[in-house]
Image (spheres, rainbow, N blue to C red):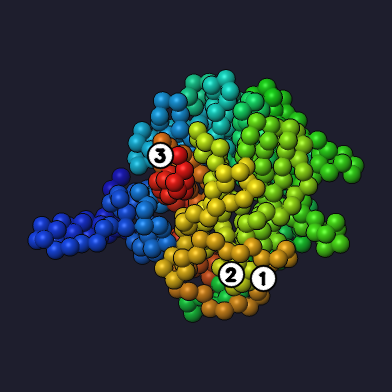
Amino acid sequence: MGLSNFERTARDLISRRHLLRRILLAAGIPVLASRFTEAGPVISTGLDPRFLEKLRNCLPEDTLFFHAGISFGSMRELTGGDLLHISTQRRERTLSRDGGKSWDAPQPLLTVSGETLKGEGRPEGGNPSLLQLESGGLALVYSKKTADPAHNHTVWFSRSDDGAASWSPPRKISEPYNNAWKFHNSAIVTSRGRIVVPVFTLVGKSLKERGRALFDDGPALIGHHGWEEFFAYCWAYYSDDEGRTWKTNTGKGVWAAGGELFATVDHSSGGHYQTTEPSVVEVAPDHLLMLLRTPLGRLYQSWSEDDGASWSRPEPSPVASALAPPAVERIPGTHELLLVWNQSSAEEIRQGLQRHRLSSAISRDGGASWESRPNVFSTFQKADGRIRIEPPPISFYRARERASRLPPNDLEGTYPSIAFWKDTVLVSFMCRERSYYSLDSEGRTGYDHPPGQRGTTTHVCVALPLSRFRGGAP
């Protein structure tokens, strides 16, 4: 298939820039170092070059390379050094032999009988976690909507013993007559071999966002789920036999047993608040940390001392956060944790700028404290280089119904995931232009229009040196 006009334009701009650089260097004229080690992004679909330039300006100086326009799901370095990527939404797998710079042609996700991997009902699935099992096989845990109108949010498991070439028939993890959903890359296999899958559910009614701000020559939506009428809580499933059977954490569904994890302020006097899209990481054998998304200006945290079988009451973490999910992973071969999340101040949340910075931090003490590291993405990269924001008081924060004008270069970067390949960290996230949220004369946004008609929304994968996060650590 030939290149689109957008792709040809982007390619020509990159080529001219590098030609000019070579001419200047040959003439002995000093040239500033390129902002990127690799020449330009790899584009799988036609993206507006103006969007790509805005994206470049939001990425760090030490970016090695980045991809835009690719549906990134879950990635894992295999034993032989290849990088495997799984997209359950597109039901395909791809392989990279150079740490994500280039990828082989996609291959379908097939069961051992040759059928497309899917659960019951609708075929699409999402939010995958690609896991390495203790026995050496691979596991895939993902969310899926089914045809059941009442209980259509479910979680599924499949395994492969031939390097992802074929998969076992999907097995439903979530129990009947219950809705459950998971965040991508949130499940883990502990050092004991246990699979732990954190999930959440909603109770109540979801409403359309009410926050508005001026953007360009009209109004645009701001905020995410700040004006809702639902409650949400989290829990975990776990398996000790590599996915054949599953249990819920202690107390789940038991009267007054505390198995449902949500935020409680001042022993109920300050109210109960939703927690959603949890992620889990192992900090030591039997000791796990769960980070939870909340509207209280912080990530909340819960701890397990029995390998995920039971969890402590969620409490505030020392990390300022928007109402957005975090990604947390243990750096291979170390005891250090890497966190990437939407760090935001209370005022940024009120202005509708709560997903405009993807920050990073390292913990060397099992999540008790976090050391700030340079941002992974920031709309404020040049104007505001803050890497740490003082956590606000515990309170409910949301976008104003009428906020001030948004900047013209407005981009969101959110829903991060982390993968490692040798000495490189690959951070994938969703990126969206504010024009996607612009309201037309009928009050519709990009959600209501065909893709590409109202602003760019895509996935981005950024490769960064591991040293930028670890600092001077051995």
Whether residue 253 is visible to the viewer of this picture, yes or no, is yes
Q: Is residue 109 left or right of residue 391?
A: left
> Comparing marks 2 and 3, which lies closer to the viewer?
3
Query: Which residue corresponds to the image point at 72% horizontal and 42% vertical from the top-left?
Result: 303
> Comparing marks 1 and 2, which lies closer to the viewer?
2
- Residue pointed to by mark 2: 348
- Residue pointed to by mark 3: 423
How many labels sit on residues?
3
Q: Is residue 464 left or right of residue 179?
A: left
Question: In the image shown, does 413 or 308 lie closer to the viewer?
Answer: 308
Q: CA distance from mark 1 to mark 3?
A: 44 Å
Q: Earlier in the sequence, mark 1 or mark 2?
A: 1
Quadrant the C terminus occupies:
top left
Query: Which residue corresponds to the image point at 87% horizontal and 41% vertical from the top-left?
Result: 257
- Residue pointed to by mark 1: 210
Asked whether the beta carbons under mark 1 and mark 2 sit within 8 Å of each other, the answer is no
Q: Is residue 271 left or right of residue 334?
A: right
